[in-house]
Amino acid sequence: MPVHQPPATDLVGRAVELDALQAALGAARGGRAAGVLVEADAGVGKSRLVAELVQRARAAGDLVLVGHCASAGGEALPYLPFVEALEPLRTPQAPSWWAAARPGEAGADLSQLQLFDAVAVALATAARERPVLLVLEDLHWADGASRDLLTYLLRRVREERLLVVATVRTDDLHRRHPLRPVLAELGRLPVVHRVVLEPFSAEEMTHFLRALAGRDVSAATVRRIHARAEGNAYYAGELLMAGGRGGAAALPTALADVVLARVEALPAGTAGVVRAAAVGGRRVRHDLLRTATGLPDDELERHLRDAVALRVLDPDGGDGYAFRHALLHEAVYGDLLPGERVRLHAAYAQAVRTARAQGRWVASAAELAHHARQSHDLAGALVAGIAAADEAEGLRAPAQAWRHVEEVLPLWSAVPDAAGVTGTTRLELLLRASRLASLAGDPGRSALLALSALDVLAPDAPAPVAAEAHRRCATALWGCDRWEEALAHAHRAQEAGAGEPAAAHAVCWALAVAARCHFELDAFEAARRACGAALELASRHGFAGAEADVLITLGGLDNLDGALEDADALFTRAAAAAEQAGHLGTALRARYNRAVDRYDRGDLAGAARLLDESCAWAAAAGLSWAPYGLQLLTLQATAAFVAGEFDRALELARALGPQAPHAATVGVGVVAAQVLAARGALEEAQALLEPAWRDDVEEGLSAAAAQAEVLRWRGEPAAAATVLVEALFSFPGIEHPAHLAGLRLGAQALGALADAGSRDTALAERVSARVEELAATGQPRAGALGPEGRAWLATARAERCRLLGSPAAQQVQAWREVVEAFSYGDAYALARARWRLAEACTAAGAREEALPVLDAARRTAAALRAAPLAAALEELARRLRVDAPPGRGPLTARELQVLDLLAAGLTNRAVGERLFMAEKTASVHVSRILAKLGASSRAEAVSIGLRSGLLAGVPGALPGGEDPAGRARR
């Protein structure tokens, strides 16, 4: 039976923090939902403060839901705190939110979105009846799925009568703790507030110790305890309790010694129960503890009553007990003898197995695996670890499932008849680990595991087994851009499964992967043949996922032929079909291709809409780190940067956090470094760029460009040129995307050489020749260079003119072409091009043309907060004796209206009619426009207006592409 806790001390010294919590709860009662993060070091009093809030909320009639995050040896069942907290909302008629099909069954690949939405709706429904306080204790131990669900809820809440309070142990948050980026993201939400608890002051410590002791405590004792505990309430309480039992003469100097002194002071039987409880975890169920100790109920309850009375354990409000503090649990567990620890873990493992066999849920499979491992029961750990992976995968947590499979793989060879014990094979386990690693964002590990699976593939393996093993290997290698190897394994899968009906699925997917490989290797006819064979097989057997995958490859082939609308239709059709069939990875590939196509065509606004939608979809499906999920995140940040949305690009980079896979960190980090460099935060940008990034397969060229940007604005153009030239000649360059990145690198290399005053004409011609070769021989997605490719090619030619000192008129014309090319929407590149055009016009004596161009560039630099570029433009403005701040150039408001109508092709008479002025007046305005712009004709005035951003609706200050980083996997 449960044992009740004695009355706690009154709350001491937390009036301000409690007022903040009560104010938030009061606002929630009025329909302003909010979240509060209660943060402090271990033992400072987070739980005591929240307990006071819970007591007052219950007294006011609010619905209080409490869930605890728990860690048993690092293992935690996904959504554990929410499962506990939301149990009171369940009814016999309501299905479980947490029920999920087993992996491989229909519905197993459904998005997390349904689950998250169901939880949000349940809380909102409850809040309509009465205010709801949801408390999540010990968020630092939360599993990844629970962290995602909490973030979703706090992003969604608005007018519900709901307050979410979560406690966080800050001293647990090491630099790479997975909760750190979550806290950073939550901190930016307007509905989330922070309450930070500080250690007790000397005065507060005096009140606390006197209340705890129930008597007066000498000032000397208070000073000594306060100094040793450094204001930590828990530490102070432990020191006081230990001193009160005779240890005052020589109080221990380490908290562990104090804790153990208290435990040793317990009656022998009670101390044994406490040690047994420590093996169960920070919190332990009463029934599991009873089974593990083997004690009769009355004897166990007597010992528990003593442990609770002496404040070693606390009833947790349910059917179990919790150590008063994590440090207390850790100290007791660490003091166990090795044999004692093994014996008790074995007892817990057996208790969990017995309960699960009887249909009673007492612990997760992950906890069972932990107990089995610690008791040296390798067979039990193997079985439970696989079951833990099943549970995690069923709960849409592929990264946790992968970790469980990786943990049991080393046990396989140590367990006799492991296949018979587990009902699976080592081959199947390796292939599963490979698939999960890919979903978790580690393609390199996925490929390594798939290749390891082939090492255990028997020479006489059945055809379906061999075909599937090679198919998985082909898929994993393709994910690492090892296309020739992937193609070889795809062929081996087809050979192994040829003529075997049971292997048709593996063969069909192998054909689909082969088509992708042929595509990447520019063997387009072979790709079409493989697509045709795969479609025929998919149609015959109803393999919807493989059919959708092939449609995406065919869309890429249509792109190359210039049939852009046909390609988009195929991508759209593939995405819908794949989602309907539950093949979310394939749907993600289709979504990526749709977005990158828009981007390559220069439709930045359309691309941004698709990217935002697809990234949100991937996050809801738990696929942000999966193939194409990573590329979508990088392209989303890149699109924001190119469109001049610098703040958004940095926000996306910050939201990624240190828990992200390496590929995402590099891709988005390079974009963030480009923004920081453009804004003059050169040290911060340099700190972000790790040298190893320049060796990255996908992002190395972009990393080199970002590094060069830092060096150029730092005043080291020669060093920048060295970085760019080395990168330019470090890749073959005929394939897309590298050739597009090469165009950019070459253009920037020529610019850096010009800035450095280089006289190495041979190097200049070599770089120029390389750029022209890439433009002529490269393979863009759409078969021809898109807006960005053409813009960088024009930039390379203009920078060559600047470097070689071509005639001024030739340089002016070259930079006019660059400005026109970048007018598709690259805000920062367009501003730089206008800077160079204004310089060229100044050198050519064309001040009238330089002024409006310079003005437009200044406006963009100011809007972007691009400090280095703005400084360079101000220097040019001083040379031109321009004192006015940037506006819309030298034209008056009325003249700008006239120029807009000239661009629309209106005659002087039509302009007059539109603006309600005489034709002669319109003619005068036109004459003034021509004079101010230095134009000899109406057409030339319009051309100058386009280049300088004077015309309404033309990208000027902040326009809104081929991928500069060259991400173009199809």
Image (spheres, rainbow, N blue to C red):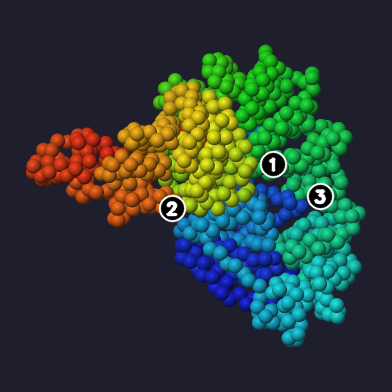
- Name the residue rendered at 74%, 62% in the picture: 326
**Which amino acid, by three-letter code, is at mark 3?**
His
Counting residues from the start of the chain, the first of labels 2 and 1 encountered is 1
For disc 3, the marked residue is 371
For disc 1, the marked residue is 401
Q: How many marks?
A: 3
**Which amino acid, by three-letter code, is at mark 1?**
Ala
**Image position of 841 with respect to 485: above or below:** below
**Judging from the image, what secondary structure is the residue with disc 1 in?**
helix
Which one is in front, 784 or 800?
A: 800
**Where the N terminus falls, by quadrant?**
bottom right
- Name the residue rendered at 50%, 45% in the picture: 712
Q: What whole-number distance in Å separates the C-alpha atoms at marks 2 and 3? A: 58 Å
Rendered location of residue 631, percent (x, y): 54, 37
**Image position of 217 with respect to 794: above or below:** below
Q: What whole-number distance in Å separates the C-alpha atoms at marks 2 and 1? A: 47 Å
Q: Quadrant of residue 515?
A: top right
Within 10 Å of disc 3 (Cα), the crowding (few <14, some 14-19, many 20+) is many
Rendered location of residue 767, percent (x, y): 50, 30
**Judging from the image, what secondary structure is the residue with disc 2 in?**
helix
Rendered location of residue 449, percent (x, y): 72, 33
For disc 2, the marked residue is 867
**Judging from the image, what secondary structure is the residue with disc 3 in?**
helix
Q: Quadrant of residue 230?
A: bottom right
- Name the residue rendered at 53%, 55% in the picture: 154
Counting residues from the start of the chain, the first of labels 2 and 3 encountered is 3
